[in-house]
Image (cartoon, rainbow, N blue to C red):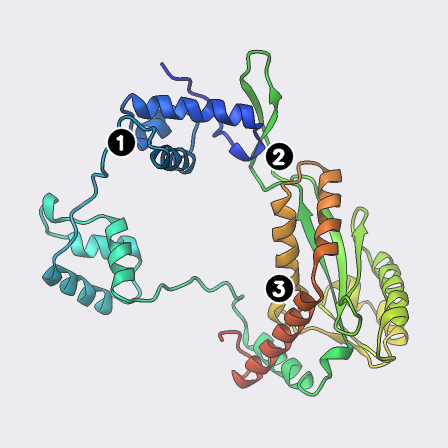
Amino acid sequence: MYPVAEPKINFNVLSPISMENHRNIIKKMLDDGFSTVKIEKSSNYTRTQINRVKKKLKERKSLRNSKPGGGKLALNAKKVKKFNSIIVKNSKASFSQLTHIYNKGKKAEDKISRSTVQNLYKKGGFRKRKAIKRPILTKKQIDARLKFARDMRDINTDVVVYTDEKWFFACRRDQWVSTGEGIDDSILYQQAPSHWQKIMYLAVVTKDTPSGKIGLYEVEGTMDKFTYLDFMKRAVGVLRRHSIHDNHILIHDGAPIHVARDIQEELQRMFSLGVIKQSPNSPDFNALDCGLFGILERKVNGESPVSLEDLRSAVRKAWKDLAPSDVKNCIDHAFNNMRKAAQKKGSNQF
């Protein structure tokens, strides 16, 4: 009888010894003739974990009851041609819908699985459709994007300063984390709360400094307009010491703390070329939103921080390792998006 426990075990937080013990349990169940699905249902392992262990055992040739897969037979040339015609006629159908359309009215032995549909789709040279991640725009937002893109057309990218805020999380939502090993060598778990430990940072970047980075400032508690102004004063001090040009222009979003009248007046004094409010619902116009924050987040998640101190050190390390070329490329990418938006009359579908 194998132990059944909830939640699913997270291999990423286990020690090497504990991980090896779990791998041995999976190996024993595979040797006893259990299928991947049966192991998943009767234990606390995910299918991905079982398949990874299974793959390593096959590479080492240490799996006793290795059986070939029991998938559906491949289609002959005539059936493949018929399937391709189904794809052309149903260009907006999902893989599951294509499977249903092909299998409709067929005998059990002539039906194909969803994975076979995916393989045939790829072999047929068809292109996968990706879900649109860009926000849906209203007519007013499209007009604002078009005006912003046209206004920025003749701006020198070297004198532009970008700023924005970003939350970094110590762990993902609903992730199960280890609390240590129990006295009987069992692993104890607790569920992460819905809102895990997190820290907000304000980042400021430009192409006008050698590193491209002006500052990354940790926000204690909630960001307000006075905290924002204080961080921007510190950023301007760094900018004046290390920049090549004397005059700069600031681009930030339309958050209330950014566009407050008294804050705008102070920022206008700091940036001689002016302060521009980014068009609404346009993260693709901000170098931080359309690239740099993604790079930082991947680096931070790669460190797997489990506490606030771990998170702080991971964010600092990611910021330190951020290459000047990354900053330059992301700013160029943001301006390239503006040019495309101007050509598309303000649309973000490009």
* Left or right of 292, for residue 72: left
Q: Indicate which disc, 3 or 2, sits on the residue closer to the N terminus.
A: 2
Label 3 Cα neighbours within 10 Å, binned few <14 / some 14-19 / many ≥20: some
* Nearest to viewer (mark 1 / mark 3): 1
**Which amino acid type corresponds to the residue marked 3 in the rendered image?**
Gly
Residues 5 and 344: in front is 5
**Along the line of sight, which residue is nearer the eye, 291 or 101?**
291
Is disc 3 in contact with disc 2, using a CB cutoff of under 8 Å?
no
**Which is more foreground, mark 3 or mark 2?**
3
Q: Residue at x 85, y 60 (%)?
A: 231
| Residue beneath disc 1 | 66
Q: Nearer the viewer, mark 1 or mark 2?
A: 1
Residue type at tag 1 = Ser
Real-space CA distance between mark 3 and mark 2, rounded to the nearest whole angstrom: 29 Å
Q: CA distance from mark 1 to mark 2?
A: 40 Å
Amino acid at dot 2: Pro
> Could you say whether the residue bearing mark 1 is in a helix, strand or loop?
loop
Screen quadrant of the N terminus:
top left
Query: How many C-alpha atoms fall within 10 Å of the one at disc 2: few (<14), some, or many (≥20)?
Result: few
Q: Where in the figure is residue 284, as x and y percent of width and height?
A: 60, 70
Query: Where in the figure is residue 321, as x and y percent of width and height?
Result: 71, 56
At which x and y percent is residue 235? 85, 64
Disc assigned to residue 193: 2
- Residue at the extreme top of the image, as rendered: 184
Give the SS element for disc 2. Answer: loop
Relative to 182, is 273 above or below? below
| Furthest residue in direction bottom, as rendered | 154
Q: Is residue 188 left or right of residue 114?
A: right
Residue located at (21% from left, 53% from top): 100
Q: Which residue is mark 3?
A: 291
Classify residue 146 by image quadrant.
Answer: bottom right
